[in-house]
Image (cartoon, rainbow, N blue to C red):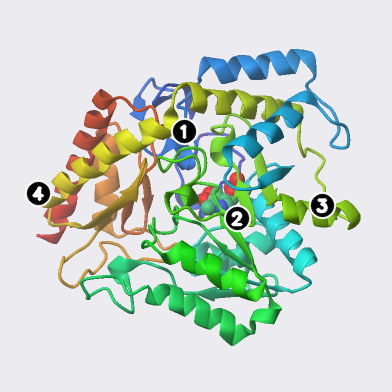
């Protein structure tokens, strides 16, 4: 721990921590107090989509702070009104009304509560490899191991299997995916009794819980299932939103529109805390005559909303969706080249500027380089990979046996090469560990 640091840090046993103190950041880099620079291959926690210290957003925050830094949530304020309008324009279908929150956790909390209020049903079906946030409802919706600390949690959450083809219990050894993962989710809904299910809540592409890209046809199957049973479909686009996957929203890659979309992170590129529960016109109409029992002191706060407006302008003006698609295609191709050279890479997967390397001890058995779905310390082999990559000046995300990449969407070709060179050092360490 840095001397005199009395903070408690998230998701960690405190004793073993040695966090760096970061003092500045710019573009694709952040810098610690000793002046050492790191290439931000993680986009912090997959949110620094426009990079660090973008002058347009910094200036928008400064201007808003000078004009109206504080106003309560029951007043309208110009940045919040404008941001809700901009969101209606960039989101698909008739997702036109936004309840603003402080982040993704609360956005999911309200999505769940709205779905329960509107349908009069209680159950929420989610998946094991998912993270939806850290408060009691959102962590109960979460499927992965970060949930266990908070169990038994809230009631009414049912988990089911994921479309994780690399370790699919149904069809990983077949040539083509059989969408048995969608059958499994449907069987869960049917088993629970569809008339008791308020919503199916999924990340269109699983983020930090395994980076699972669904097979074509999967999200459409969920849409049809929900329509047949009067169940609401909620997409958690907290990571996949705002151009990360090469489209404005991840679900647009498959042309499927949810009833509720939750967003955060990229909405301000992380410059100030903000999230939103975005609902269709049809659902919003329910609250014209029914009470909306939702509120936060800082809901629709003018400062983050001003940052949000400026961030969305950057996405539009710098064509970051297209850029993410282009650079993301290069990134995936180059990662696949790395994989050919390094036997420790079991699989490369991703979409747009969201990608991961899944590391294994053996390509045939697919034994993970570090155990999955546990908060236990990483294996020495995985710790060695981390040390080599960070030692080479790049900072991706490390989870279990995964190296996850979610860099700024405006990463230059030169920065991409710099990051790949650092990753290669990590893979050399992994190869050595399994030799
Ligand atoms: C997919 C997803 N949903 C929800 C959340 C929670 O968002 P927040 O940490 O802003 O509350 C996260 C955070 O990482 C996330 O990745």
Q: Quadrant of residue 420?
A: top left
Q: Is mark 3 within 8 Å of ligand 1?
A: no
Say which label, 3 or 2, has the lower sequence index: 2
Residue at the spot x=53%, y=58% of the render? 131
Q: Indicate the position of residue 350 as horizontal and vertical percent values.
A: 33, 50
Q: CA distance from mark 4 to mark 2?
A: 37 Å
Dot placed on the residue nearer the N-terminal end, 1 or 3 = 1
Mark 4 or 1, nearer chain start: 1
Circle 3 is placed at which residue position?
294
Cβ–Cβ under 8 Å for marks 3 and 2: no
Choose between 128 and 35: the one closer to the eye: 128
Reading the image, the residue beneath label 2 is 133
Q: Which sits in the foreground, 107 or 344?
A: 107
Q: What SS does tag 4 mark?
A: helix
**Looking at mark 2, is its residue's CB closer than 8 Å to ligand 1?**
yes
The residue under the point 47% across, 24% down is 52
As measured in the structure, the alpha-carbon distance from the residue carrying label 2 to the one carrying label 1 is: 20 Å
Q: Which residue is mark 1?
A: 49
Residue in front for this viewpoint, 425 or 208: 208
Circle 1 — which element? loop
Residue 104, placed above or below residue 298: below
168 vs 188, left or right, is: left
């Amino acid at each position: 721990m840095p001397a005199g640091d009395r903070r408690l840090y998230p998701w960690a046993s405190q004793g073993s921590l040695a966090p760096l103190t970061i003092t500045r950041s710019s573009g694709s880099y952040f810098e610690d107090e000793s002046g050492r620079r790191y290439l931000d291959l993680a986009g912090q926690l997959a949110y620094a989509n426009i990079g660090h210290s973008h002058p347009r957003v910094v200036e928008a925050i400064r201007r808003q702070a000078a004009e109206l830094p504080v106003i309560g949530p029951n007043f309208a304020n110009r940045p919040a009104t404008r941001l809700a309008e901009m969101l209606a324009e960039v989101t698909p279908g008739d997702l036109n009304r936004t309840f603003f929150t402080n982040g993704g956790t609360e956005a999911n909390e309200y999505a769940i509560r709205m779905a329960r209020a509107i349908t009069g049903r209680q159950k929420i079906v989610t998946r094991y490899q998912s993270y939806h946030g850290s408060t009691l409802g959102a962590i109960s919706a979460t499927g992965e191991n970060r949930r266990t600390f908070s169990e038994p949690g809230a009631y009414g959450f049912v988990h089911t299997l994921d479309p994780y083809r690399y370790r699919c219990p149904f069809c990983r050894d077949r040539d083509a995916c059989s969408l048995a993962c969608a059958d499994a989710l449907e069987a869960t809904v049917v088993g629970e009794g569809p008339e008791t299910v308020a919503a199916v809540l999924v990340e269109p592409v699983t983020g930090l819980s395994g980076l699972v890209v669904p097979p074509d046809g999967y999200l459409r199957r969920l849409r049809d299932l929900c329509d047949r049973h009067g169940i609401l479909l909620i997409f958690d686009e907290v990571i996949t939103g705002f151009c990360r996957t090469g489209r404005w929203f991840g679900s647009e890659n498959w042309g499927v529109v949810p009833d509720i979309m939750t967003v955060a992170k990229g909405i301000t590129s992380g410059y100030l805390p903000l999230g939103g529960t975005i609902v269709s016109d049809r659902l919003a109409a329910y609250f014209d005559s029914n009470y909306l029992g939702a509120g936060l002191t800082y809901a629709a706060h003018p400062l983050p909303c001003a940052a949000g407006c400026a961030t969305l302008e950057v996405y539009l003006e710098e064509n970051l969706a297209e850029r993410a698609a282009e650079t993301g295609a290069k990134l995936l191709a180059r990662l696949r080249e790395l994989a050919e050279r390094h036997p420790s890479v079991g699989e490369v997967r991703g979409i747009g500027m969201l990608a991961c390397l899944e590391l294994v001890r053996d390509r045939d058995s697919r034994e993970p380089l570090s155990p999955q779905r546990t908060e236990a310390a990483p294996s020495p082999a995985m710790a060695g990979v981390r040390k080599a990559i960070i030692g080479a000046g790049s900072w991706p995300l490390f989870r279990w046996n995964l190296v996850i990449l979610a860099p700024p969407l405006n990463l230059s070709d030169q920065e991409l090469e710099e990051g790949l060179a650092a990753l290669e050092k990590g893979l050399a360490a992994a190869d050595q560990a399994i030799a």
